[in-house]
Image: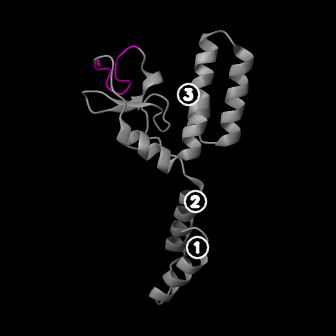
């Protein structure tokens, strides 16, 4: 897709008699979102139910839900609250998908989770710096909602 958006739109236009503006709008938004590494919707199957972002260090419980390891340190699924045996193995397939589909969001989420650890260690200034860096890397709604 890199550098071929104009060509793709030309082919799309030539395939039909008329280009429906709504369909063209959806296509252009999808292309822009894909090029920008769009964030997962809040209800996405791969989204963490606790922080609503792409799962960082994803683990999958016996219930089938996947979440960020740092988001459920108590050993319970944040979606259904079922107990999860410890330690859970990383879900390497979800980790690879997150790295491929949401690289900026994954980087921002790493910074956000590091900030949470810094806050727990009573290190407010470095935590704020990490959160500001996360917002600069990738301004997704889940960064400010959790």
Q: Nearer the viewer, mark 3 or mark 1?
A: 1
Q: CA distance from mark 1 to mark 2?
A: 10 Å
- The magenta-colored residue range is 74-84
Position of residue 14 in the picture relative to residue 137 (left or right): left
The location of residue 49, given as percent across then percent down, is 42, 31
Position of residue 136 in the picture relative to residue 21 (left or right): right
Q: Residue at x 66, y 35 (%)?
A: 134
Q: Residue at x 71, y 15 (%)?
A: 124
Residue at the far top in the pictured view: 122
Question: Within 10 Å of the Cα at label 2, are there few (<14), some (14-19), or many (20+) other Cα atoms?
Answer: few
Question: Within 10 Å of the Cα at label 1, are there few (<14), some (14-19), or many (20+) other Cα atoms?
Answer: few
Please identify the quadrant where the N terminus is shown.
bottom right
Q: Residue at x 62, y 10 (%)?
A: 121
Pointer 1 and pointer 2: residues touching (CB < 8 Å)? yes
The image quadrant of residue 9 is bottom right
Residue 35's mark? 2
Q: CA distance from mark 3 to mark 1?
A: 35 Å
Q: Nearer the viewer, mark 3 or mark 2?
A: 2
Residue at numbered disc 1:
5
The reply to whether the magenta stretch includes residue 28 is no
The location of residue 53, given as percent across then percent down, is 50, 37
> Residue 102 versus residue 143: which sits nearer the camera?
102
Residue 146's mark? 3
């Amino acid at each position: 897709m890199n550098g071929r958006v104009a060509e793709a739109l030309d082919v799309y236009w030539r395939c039909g008699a008329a280009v429906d503006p709504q369909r063209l709008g959806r296509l252009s938004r999808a292309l822009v979102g894909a090029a920008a590494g769009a964030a997962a919707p809040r209800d996405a199957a791969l989204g963490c139910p606790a922080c609503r972002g792409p799962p960082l260090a994803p683990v999958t419980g016996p219930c089938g839900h996947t979440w960020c390891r740092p988001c459920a340190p108590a050993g319970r699924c944040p979606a259904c609250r079922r107990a999860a045996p410890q330690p859970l193995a990383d879900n390497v397939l979800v980790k690879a998908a997150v790295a491929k589909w949401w690289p900026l969001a994954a980087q921002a989420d790493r910074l956000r989770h590091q900030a949470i650890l810094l806050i727990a260690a009573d290190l407010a200034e470095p935590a704020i710096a990490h959160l500001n860096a996360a917002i600069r890397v990738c301004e997704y709604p889940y960064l400010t909602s959790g």
